[in-house]
Amino acid sequence: GLGAVMSRHRRLQFLVKRQFESDVARLVEVSREADSILNHTLKNTMADAAGEIEMFLESDHLRRSVACLQRGMRSCRHRQAYIQLAAERYQLSCQAVHLQAFVDEHSLGLAMQRSVADLTVWLDPTLCGLLLGNAINNAFKHGHPQRPDVHLRTEIGLPSGPTPPADTRHQRGRVAFVIWNRCHPARPKIDQSFLAAVLSGQRAAGAAGSPMSDRIGLQQSFAAARAHHIEVSLVQTGDIVTFRAEMEVDVVPPEASPQQSVPAASVPPDLHICCIDDSPSMRRLLESGLGPRMGTSNVHVFGKDEDEVPEFMAKVLQDGDIAILDQHLECGSDANILGTDLVGQLLKKGFRGLICMRSGNNASEDLDNYLAAGAHCAFRKDQPLSQVAEAMKREYLRCIGANPVRLVMFEPYEAMRLQAAGQARHGQLASRLRENSSRAGGEARRGHFGRHCCVGHWGCVGFRARGSWGMVSAWAPSPTRRRRASLTHRSS
């Protein structure tokens, strides 16, 4: 009767409320621990950087200063990953990663021996960086106080053997990161009981009290690795402690590796590169460092105040070959101008050059937003400018070509396809792209300009599929040949 229905309703309300309170409490605790780690890491890395800068006359000290700052910025990215992992909402975002460059990035400025394969593979750099960073940090923090003797090596396994010949690099294989160090003589030995206590969240006897020591470091790393099919282990043999993380990967052919250097002569000379950023430091960096790496003296920077936004737009539309935009532009006013909005205006007004986003916001949803808006590629602000320039040259040659067409050419697309099936939450994005493609083809046939109708400009959108990044590619006929352009490199 009615009483039974009301009773069930009250019980359901009670259960929902209890679950909600439990989830909120867990998220608050995870946020507290993550923010504690972030605060701890940033304080120390920035202090280290300040100390190194005081000795600025020695270039080695400057390099170590940059390494400290980069570790601090990686900690900010890892904070988001920590929370998503704890909430079991983390989704893999794979990209082509050169192993030597990846390890160098995470070990720069640290006294450790490295032996890393010269190979490019598909993996999630955030998740693997989180695991690798924690392992390296623990090796130094909990290793021998005077001589930790930290070593890192990679082990590659393909069906043909541990050292793959060139013709097998298209195959799927396995990569392992192995880190070992001499243990601290005063710390308890790492055995199964010690590891079980740590991974269950308990305080093992003799363990340090800082949350950096195990609660997030080992416990969360092991949980994250196992949730995403990465085999991890931590063992001690004698006075040597060994951490191992092994995973399946797809090997990238050498010719497709993002590590392959692109000579500045490969891109057209004296390209006009227009940059907008509200940070004076970033503007100085781009103005002084981008030109020599791109083989041009035409680097124009904007963003000092709100009045420079229309100047940037006019310069891009008049002379620009490459546009580089920050996402959040706070140019001395209350207005928060979005780079993606400017991208939309550039495309609407007929810009046909390369569009790059360079922002401190690089979560998965941010990258989806940049690509959906029409950008060809996105870069992190903590990426070295040398890496940014290499990737930019590569994307320019892929998307625009060595001989960019200055005249607008209206030709319909021959075909458009999805290279991988997007998950449900990306279905709307793919549907929107198909609609834009169909509309662009119709406008081209009618002689009207459309956002996808310019030779040299391609609407390439990345979307997640089965734990990796799929691509939407487009083909269009050219007067001399049919050229395929697709976004195959994206930095997180």
Image (cartoon, helix red, strand yellow):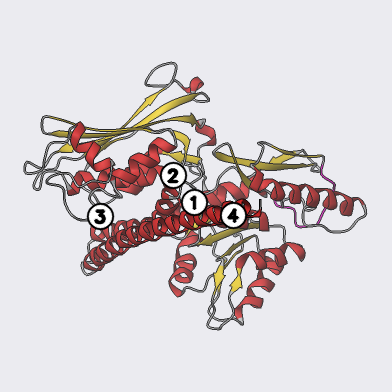
Tag 4 near tag 1, CB within 8 Å: no
Residue 232 image position (x, y, % from top left): 33, 33
For label 4, the crowd category at 10 Å Cα-Cα, with few meaning under 14, some 14 to 19 and many 20 or more, is few
Q: Is 288 located above or below residue 127 in the figure?
A: below
Q: Nearer the viewer, residue 293 or 181?
A: 181
What residue span does the magenta drawing correspond to? 404-413
**Which circle's residue, 4 or 1, is located before the other in the chain?**
4
Say which amino acid is labelled 2: Pro
Q: Secondary structure at mark 4?
A: helix
Q: Residue at x 43, y 71 (%)?
A: 281
- Residue position marked by numbered label 2 in the rendering: 125
Disc 2 versus disc 4: distance between alpha carbons? 46 Å
**Mark on residue 492?**
1
**Mark on residue 211?**
3
**Which circle's residue, 2 or 4, is located before the other in the chain?**
4
Say which amino acid is labelled 4: His
Tag 1 near tag 2, CB within 8 Å: yes
